[in-house]
Amino acid sequence: MSAEATQETKCLVTVNGTVREFDGPPHANALDFLRGQRLIGCKEGCAEGECGACSILVARGDGEGSRWTAVNACLLPAASLDGQEVITSEGLGSVADLHPVQAEMANRGGSQCGYCTPGFICSMAAEYYRPERTASPAVSAEASGEHECGPNGFDLHALSGNLCRCTGYRPIRDAAYALGAPEEDDPLAARTQRSAPHPVATDILRADTPTGELGRFRRATDLDQALQILAAEPQTVLVAGATDWGVEVNIKGARARSVLAIDRLPELRQIHWGEQFLELGAACTLSELERQLAGRVPLLGKLFGQFASRLIRNSATLGGNLGTGSPIGDTPPALLALEAQLVLSSIRGNRVVALAEYFTGYRQTVREPGEMITAIRIPLPLAELTSFQKISKRRFDDISSVAVGYAVTVEDGVISKARIGLGGVAATPLRAKATEEMLEGKEWNLDTIRAAASITGEEGTPMDDHRASASYRKAMLASSLERFYAEQLSRSGAGQEQNS
């Protein structure tokens, strides 16, 4: 990658089969770019990735083939699509030849004002082409955890990031459950049999129109190149899924002189099971992790379905969620309970930091200038009893008021190890160490749990804000341990606790 960018550098994006040129500025999102190309099906509703009106399809790698993945165009930097393939609602079908998703939405009355409809259709199309979707008996959310599937295998939670304000969700659900399998001659289905486009080196330098200040967007081709850039320009903003940075740009008007995309770096997209650790690449999306781990890390499996929406999880990464240093991120409590470690890389080499020692203050961490999170290590073997509890105003697609991760090992009726991660109760995510010490060495029974619960309620320094009061947060902490205990009894099929 050249040290000096030129004004003539181009970004070429294949949209609905046609190559189109994006000419900046670097902070512009994919939604604005597409609407500038007169593709006005995708719309801005919230500019925060919460309504799904801007949903589009991007071809993402999936083994030797590819997968149509729905993402929020309002958050995605347009320059990050350089060399990639995109499908909008206009590219799915036409008035004369409707796509099956469009036809079912029309037949079932799934559209009224129509503002949200193109976004729904793109999210539905991604699920329509999901290779794991097969016809089977309908499964309720209660029976499957965080997934509710129709008789055609359609996971209704694929639409969890799409909001409709006037039609009502029943006809939209009916349309989703009426979909059959793609026809053999379906060109978008056939496209998934070929590999996705490889990421290309990108380097554009443009002026931001309102301020006149130059901004630069780059995509390195490998980790070494990315670290060299970061060492030379430590203030560079690292972007993976842009689910946090995109909000800063849209809502707060944030601009950066230098943005570096690291989402497609191959070194940050590996999953490796070793004898001592499971290592997760920091740039793997949460949807990819959910799919590839396939429940083998039960605590993360319980977390994934409660993290924002499918649209967000298709872009969000573990590295990004930890890199923000937010005290209310969903992944830190679970990873703290798993005793996760972070691999921090720079041109000086790698160092490993325990996640419990990573956060130093509100949105502050031990990460030094020139460093990036490249992997998350989870020690093995995993605890046998785990839970993730998220207390929020909505069950899905919401920010937590309190989040708690549990990982407990019980041997011969005695708690041999307890790890509890907390979020939303202090300036940083933290371990509930006083509760852990109280539990370890004690019998696994209700008396122990009740005694420890009073300690849990005093962990952290919760505050009053618009999501919850400090007293409410304390109450939720105190009750969460008993809830965890009840969950484990229910799952184990144990009878009534003798000490109740």
Image: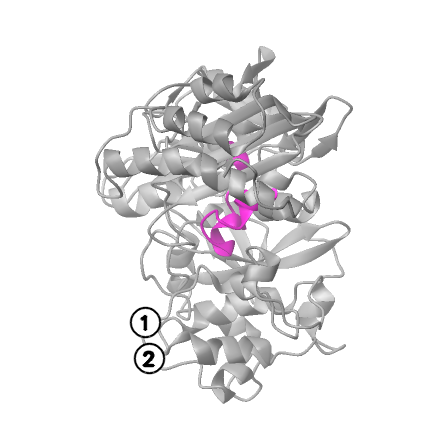
Task: Residue 316: say if magenta.
Answer: yes
Mark number for residue 113? 2
User: Could you tell me how far apart the alpha carbons at marks 2 and 1 are, in whole angstroms?
Assistant: 9 Å
Count residues near mark 1 (Cα–Cα under 10 Å), then give few for <14, some for 14-19, many for 20+.
few
The residue positioned 65% from the left and 30% from the top of the image is 383
Q: Is residue 200 visible?
A: no
Which of these two is toward me, 186 or 475?
A: 475
Q: Nearer the viewer, mark 2 or mark 1?
A: 1
Which of these two is toward me, 92 or 135?
A: 135
Q: Are marks 2 and 1 in contact (CB under 8 Å)?
A: yes
Give the magenta-colored segment's residue range: 301-320
Q: Secondary structure at mark 2?
A: loop
Label located before the other in sequence (2 or 1): 2
Task: Residue 109: say if magenta.
Answer: no
Q: Is residue 98 visible?
A: yes
Count residues near mark 2 (Cα–Cα under 10 Å), then give few for <14, some for 14-19, many for 20+.
few
Which of these two is toward me, 456 or 446?
A: 446
Q: Which residue is mark 1?
A: 165
Labels in figure, total = 2
Spot occupied by residue 263 in the image (x, y as percentages of width and height): 56, 39
In the rendered image, the residue lying farthest to the top is 348
Q: Amino acid at mark 1?
A: Arg
The residue positioned 22% from the left and 38% from the top of the image is 465
The answer to which image quadrant residue 131 occupies is bottom right
Mark number for residue 277? none
Is the residue 364 above or below the residue 195 in the image? above
